């Protein structure tokens, strides 16, 4: 079994799905920004080179744990290792207007063409908003008007039993959902289905793939930065 798995992995194309962590990257206004400060430097005569990082849990490509929206919900350090490993599915909603949402009808129409979403799938929404990813001061377009997932769509995926739901934008809920609030977060995190945000390179996933990512083991954490990858058929 192990040899077969290694053969499959070695022959697959690996796609990096994480944004680079660097100072000036887009971060929600209420969240801590990312800082990288040099501690030791070989150029300055130190034995080694190292930095200290200041980073919010919801910075960059990351996963939300249940306790982000559910009081006393499951924290990130209790998330099963298999939770973010599974068949990946990409749904393209880039044609929606600014602040538009993927409705239940849209998802079911997608299934008619692409096949049924299955239990334990990891569903990723390509909004096209990644094209605005930039460093400060040029990141303003990324910080607003992104597309998202409707409550009914989130509830449908919840009822299927998917492992996780993600997006290439700053949040899975649209920038200004018509109903207000965070309906997709409420529906999914309420059922302990993690939410992935700021996923990169979804446009490159043109063949069947396995999604794989692992959160940091942060005690009582509400989220964790991720190095997410896709193993895609070559």
Image: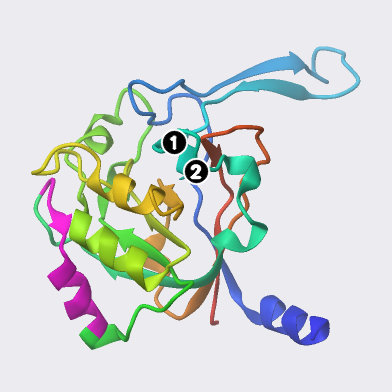
Report x, y in % for residue 54. 59, 20
Which region is colored magenta? 98-111
Q: Is disc 1 placed on a helix, strand or loop? A: helix
Report x, y in % for residue 183. 23, 46
Report x, y in % for residue 115. 32, 86
Report x, y in % for residue 95. 14, 62
At horizontal 31% and vertical 60% (from top left) the residue drawn is 125
Q: Nearer the viewer, residue 12 or 170?
A: 170
- The answer, for residue 150, to whether it is visible in the render is no
Above or below, comparing residue 160 to residue 224 in the picture: below
At horizontal 61% and vertical 78% (from top left) the residue drawn is 12
- The answer, for residue 46, to whether it is visible in the render is yes
Q: Are marks 1 and 2 in contact (CB under 8 Å)?
A: yes
Above or below, comparing residue 6 to residue 223 in the picture: below
- Crowding near the residue tagged with mark 2, few <14, some 14–19, many ≥20 C-alpha atoms within 10 Å: many
Q: Is residue 43 left or right of residue 118?
A: right
Mark sitting on residue 68:
1
Mark sitting on residue 209:
none
């Amino acid at each position: 079994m192990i040899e077969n798995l290694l053969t499959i992995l070695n022959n697959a194309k690996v796609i990096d799905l994480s944004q680079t962590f660097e100072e000036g990257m887009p971060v929600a206004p209420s969240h801590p920004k990312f800082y990288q400060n040099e501690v030791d430097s070989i150029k300055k005569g130190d034995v080694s080179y190292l930095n200290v990082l200041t980073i919010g849990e919801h910075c960059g490509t990351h996963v939300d744990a249940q306790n982000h929206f559910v009081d006393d919900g499951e924290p990130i350090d209790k998330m099963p290792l298999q939770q973010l490993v599974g068949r990946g599915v990409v749904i393209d909603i880039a044609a929606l207007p600014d602040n538009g949402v993927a409705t239940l009808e849209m998802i079911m129409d997608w299934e008619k063409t692409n096949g049924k979403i299955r239990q334990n799938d990891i569903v990723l929404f390509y909004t096209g908003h990644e094209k605005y990813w930039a460093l400060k001061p040029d990141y303003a377009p990324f910080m607003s008007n992104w597309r998202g997932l409707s409550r009914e769509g989130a509830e449908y995926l919840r009822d299927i039993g998917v492992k996780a739901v993600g997006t290439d934008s700053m949040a899975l809920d649209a920038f200004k959902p018509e109903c207000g609030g965070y309906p997709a977060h409420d529906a999914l995190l309420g059922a302990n289905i993690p939410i992935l945000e700021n996923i990169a390179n979804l446009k490159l996933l043109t063949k069947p793939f396995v999604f794989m990512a692992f959160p940091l083991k942060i005690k009582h954490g509400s989220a964790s930065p991720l190095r997410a990858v896709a193993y895609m058929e070559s």
